[in-house]
Image: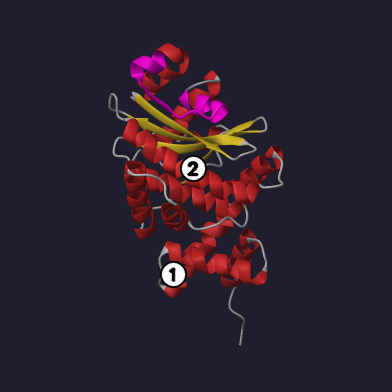
């Protein structure tokens, strides 16, 4: 695990980014589906399987964060050359990292945001998937590529856009420390994954402005703590894994028509309260 300097507390563009979830059976299955679909074609059944592995449809921005976390883990399982992975949101004048695997991801992202251009921002703004090595990236984005290579040892980039029919949302970013770490097959896998993620986001963002989507996701990142606390409490009380705990929260949210973060906050308050004196 990368234990070097973590910039999240020092830069508003990365300070609220959440770590990706640990792999489980669902993300491993999702990786298999994505790879198989890339080798053949994205069938309707493959979309359903991959969407199920990602957690299903999105009801609110808190569930969107979880979907992005799962998607990052699927990419991590599916693509061997990826040493660091993150999701950049570049929407309505806001640019920030929503999910990351390690602090190196955040440091490389900051270098790119400071430079104002690079493979990830290019993918986000053009809708094109970018696969480049150190030499090509140095020619196209010299400032960013030099910093990424010198400071973090990153020599390869794969960036796949996130988009809906109405909006370009950002990009999935894979960083490799090996030269030519990514190939066309890896790009196809990422296209399958981002296409499925984008469809789910499209359902969530329908009838919302770009600014409303960006603001909602940023709020979800800022208020993530109660959800993680509630999950931990449910895991300890019921002796269940993190995935099952989240499904309990989500079911309660849907049953009561209450926002996920409000359900989580209520659970935290309930189980944190001192026992009533007899």
Magenta-drawn stretch, dominant element (helix, strand or loop)? helix
Query: For residue 274: magenta?
Result: no
The residue tagged with tag 1: helix, strand or loop? helix
Q: Position of residue 206 (x, y in %)?
A: 67, 47
28 lies above or below 96: below
Question: Looking at the image, which residue sits at the far bottom?
Answer: 278
74 lies above or below 82: below
Residue in the picture at 55% in, 58% down:
227
Q: Position of residue 250 (x, y in %)?
A: 56, 65
Q: Position of residue 63 (x, y in %)?
A: 56, 55
Q: Is residue 149 left or right of residue 94?
A: left
Residue in the picture at 47% in, 54% down:
51
The residue tagged with tag 2: helix, strand or loop? helix
The residues colored magenta run 119-138
Task: Identify the residue under disc 2.
Answer: 195
Numbered marks: total: 2
Query: For residue 125: magenta?
Result: yes
Identify the image quadrant of residue 180: top left
Task: Identify the residue under disc 1.
Answer: 236
Identify the image quadrant of residue 258: bottom right
Q: CA distance from mark 2 to mark 1?
A: 36 Å
Q: Is residue 113 visible?
A: yes
Image quadrant holding the C terminus, namely bottom right
Q: Nearer the viewer, residue 253 or 128?
A: 128
Residue in the picture at 62% in, 63% down:
265
């Amino acid at each position: 695990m990368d234990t070097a300097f973590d910039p999240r507390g020092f830069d508003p563009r990365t300070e609220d980014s959440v770590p990706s979830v640990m792999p489980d059976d669902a993300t491993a299955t999702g990786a298999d589906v994505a790879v198989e679909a890339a080798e053949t074609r994205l069938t309707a059944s493959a979309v359903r399987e991959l969407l199920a592995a990602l957690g299903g449809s999105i009801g609110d921005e808190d569930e969107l964060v979880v979907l992005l976390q799962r998607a990052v883990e699927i990419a991590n399982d599916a693509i061997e050359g990826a040493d660091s992975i993150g999701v950049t949101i570049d929407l309505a004048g806001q640019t920030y990292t929503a999910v990351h695997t390690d602090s190196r991801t955040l440091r490389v992202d900051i270098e790119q945001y400071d430079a104002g251009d690079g493979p990830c921002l290019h993918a986000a703004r053009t809708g094109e998937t970018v696969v480049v090595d150190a030499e090509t990236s140095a020619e196209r984005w010299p400032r960013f590529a030099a910093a990424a290579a010198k400071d973090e040892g990153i020599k390869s980039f794969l960036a796949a856009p996130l988009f809906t029919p109405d909006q370009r949302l950002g990009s999935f970013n894979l960083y490799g420390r090996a030269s030519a770490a990514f190939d066309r097959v890896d790009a196809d896998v990422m296209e399958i994954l981002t296409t499925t993620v984008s469809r789910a986001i499209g359902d969530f963002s329908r009838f919302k402005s770009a600014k409303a989507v960006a603001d909602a996701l940023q709020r979800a990142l800022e208020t993530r703590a109660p959800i993680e606390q509630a999950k931990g409490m449910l895991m300890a009380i019921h002796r269940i894994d993190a995935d099952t705990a989240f499904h309990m929260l989500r079911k309660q949210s849907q049953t009561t028509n209450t926002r996920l973060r409000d359900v989580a906050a209520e659970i935290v308050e309930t189980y944190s309260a001192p026992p009533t004196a007899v």
